[in-house]
Amino acid sequence: DAGVIQSPRHEVTEMGQEVTLRCKPISGHNSLFWYRQTMMRGLELLIYFNNNVPIDDSGMPEDRFSAKMPNASFSTLKIQPSEPRDSAVYFCASSSRGGQDEQFFGPGTRLTVL
Amino acid sequence: RKEVEQDPGPFNVPEGATVAFNCTYSNSASQSFFWYRQDCRKEPKLLMSVYSSGNEDGRFTAQLNRASQYISLLIRDSKLSDSATYLCVAGQTGANNLFFGTGTRLTVIP
């Protein structure tokens, strides 16, 4: 079975550019999570969706960040405009029975903003 | 205060050694607990769930102490392939989310 799919795997962009990260959760999972991981701050939850509805976006650092989930099989995380401090690995994860259950992570997108 | 706290290490142990990690969680309402493993430049992957009665999977044993609000992971007969970062995770009823510790780095030395 396919796991969580993320694209792109690597992204290098210049400050000020728009960045869009994509995620396809595991089929049948009703919860989707976006995380950011850095050496300094570890794994931080940015936002999560339940049945395509954003439940908690309190982890989104600024208005420059936005996330959507137009259907059960696709989600995007957008950064506009990007800044060097946004450089991190962004993970998408999905869960079948809500947030307290095991989460399955995608391979991540390694973002570098120059 | 962080929801889940763990010693970042690093723990450097020889092959064959037994090593134990502990972590503490702050919310007594936490109901689900896990240990995840993360290899360098990879995503976190579930290692094992942690049950109230404790559970064992081969060389790995996980235990939960609700009274003291800590979770432990014991690795026996360490292998080189056990080298990774181990993330302690707690979930809370009503929060609909998991809280991840910052991880404990383990290096098993030949």
Image (cartoon, coloured by chain):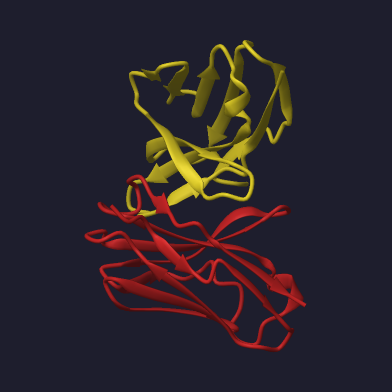
Residue B109: quarter of image: top right
- In this rendering, the answer to whether A51 lies above or below A2 is below
- In this rendering, the answer to whether B28 lies above or below A92 is above
Q: Is residue A56 found left or right of A28 in the rendered image?
A: right
Residue B48: quarter of image: top left
* Residue appearing at x 26%, y 62% in the figure: A30
Foreground pick, A51 / A1: A1
Foreground pick, A94 / B28: A94
Q: Colour of chain B?
A: yellow
Residue A77 x %, y %:
49, 76
* Residue appearing at x 63%, y 30% in the figure: B83
Q: Is residue B68 found left or right of A99 in the rendered image?
A: right
Foreground pick, B9 / B46: B46
Residue A32 x %, y %:
36, 63
Q: Is residue B89 found left or right of B79 in the rendered image?
A: left
Q: Colour of chain A?
A: red
Residue A97 x %, y %:
25, 52
Residue A101 x %, y %:
32, 46
- In this rendering, the answer to whether B11 lies above or below B41 is above
Taking the view exactly as shown, the residue that stands out farthest to the left is: A28
Q: Split into 4 quadrants, where in the image is the C terminus of chain A?
A: bottom right
* Residue appearing at x 57%, y 49% in the figure: B42
* Residue appearing at x 66%, y 88% in the figure: A17
- In this rendering, the answer to whether B31 lies above or below B75 is below
